[in-house]
Amino acid sequence: MILPIVKKPQIIKIALLLAVLVSLPRNIHVYNMISSGNEQFENVWVLDFLYRMVFMVFFSWAILEINANVVYIKFNLRGTYATIVIILFDLVMLFATLYLWKALHPLIIGNPLSDEDRGFLTFGYVTLLIVLYFIARILRLQVNQRVTDIENEHLKHQNLQKELTALKNQIDPHFLFNSLNSLTSLIRDNEPATQFVKKLSYMYRYILQSGDIDLVSIREELKFLESYTYLMKTRYRERFEIEVAIAEGLLGRKIPPLALQLLVENAVKHNEISESNPLLVRVYSRENSIFIENPLRPRTTMAVGTGTGLLNLRKRYLLLQHQTVLVRSENGIFQVELPLRKIE
């Protein structure tokens, strides 16, 4: 997720407010001395006030910007690494500001700093740094939460749209299954046709059931793939072949439903299938991954499709498995790798 930026006007307002609050006790003290008739302070008070305010505003702005934006946005750091870098930056800013403040004060104001002023200065900036650190954390959490809320609302809207689309396009399953059963009774003497209808019926039932399931075992997915393969071989005969070699120990692992079928279907949809160029799709396992690969022979006339099948699979896989589907295309071979999570 791309982290949002804490807006600069908000940071500037907070920096100004904190600078006024931190310098307020000393300014009141100086004002009281001037009011009591000690006029030696009157000439330098305005310049001293502006000098302190400029330093504190700049220091507050810099710390807030570093803590709330720079480390997370520019350096793209998270967690413990971000905290360590923030603390290092804060300490560097603190020592650099104190050094410059003490070095420039006699030159600009004309009065040397007393030990009391030095102590107050160090105490004030350390206190300000601690306050700024926690304020920056709050700002960062607020903007992150705001983005999360927006994304959740967007997901809710998408889910509602999907439900609406599903309702609009819904076909009564009972009607379809009854029709398929009727068709089976009509062609019962034709074994290939009967078998085709049974496979089609099983596929449709599996697709309906998978809508309520996030993950299925590879064993279940291979059974569904076998039915899909039967339909494809009925259509293309010897022009289409598939080799499946999945290690027995991986059959209990989970993947999103229809993942294997979608990738095999992609190979059928986007590659030439002819007597001179039959299509061979290989589905095999290696270590903790399943690979689906086929030779690259793009169709001259592409089949009609949305072009989002593989993209949707990658999104589902990342959401459900917290892993990335890897796609490679080299040496004339198109390959998709589905990494598998261990059974917990």
Image: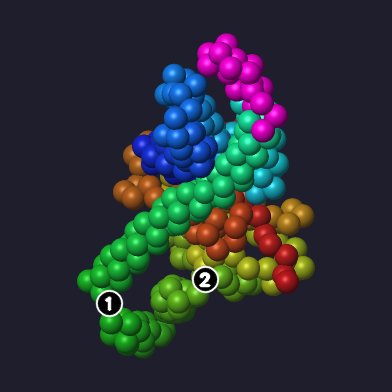
User: Which region is colored magenta?
Assistant: 98-116
- Residue at 41%, 84% (x, y): give it: 189
Residue type pointed to by label 2? Asp
Q: Earlier in the sequence, mark 1 or mark 2?
A: 1
Mark 1, secondary structure of its residue: loop
Give coordinates of residue 156: x percent, y percent: 35, 66
Residue type pointed to by label 1? Ile
Q: Which residue appears farthest toward the top when viewing the image?
A: 107
Give coordinates of residue 147: x percent, y percent: 41, 53
Whole-Å distance between the Cαs marked 1 and 2? Answer: 22 Å
- Binning the other alpha carbons within 10 Å of mark 1 as few (below 14), some (14 to 19) or many (20 upward) gives few
Q: For residue 115: magenta?
A: yes
**Image quarter of residue 35:** top left
- Residue at 38%, 47% (x, y): give it: 307
- Residue at 22%, 71% (x, y): give it: 168
Q: Which residue is denoted by mark 2 in the rendering?
A: 214
The secondary structure that dominates the magenta segment is helix
- Residue at 45%, 76% (x, y): give it: 212
Give coordinates of residue 49: x percent, y percent: 46, 27
Q: Which residue is denoted by mark 1 in the rendering?
A: 171
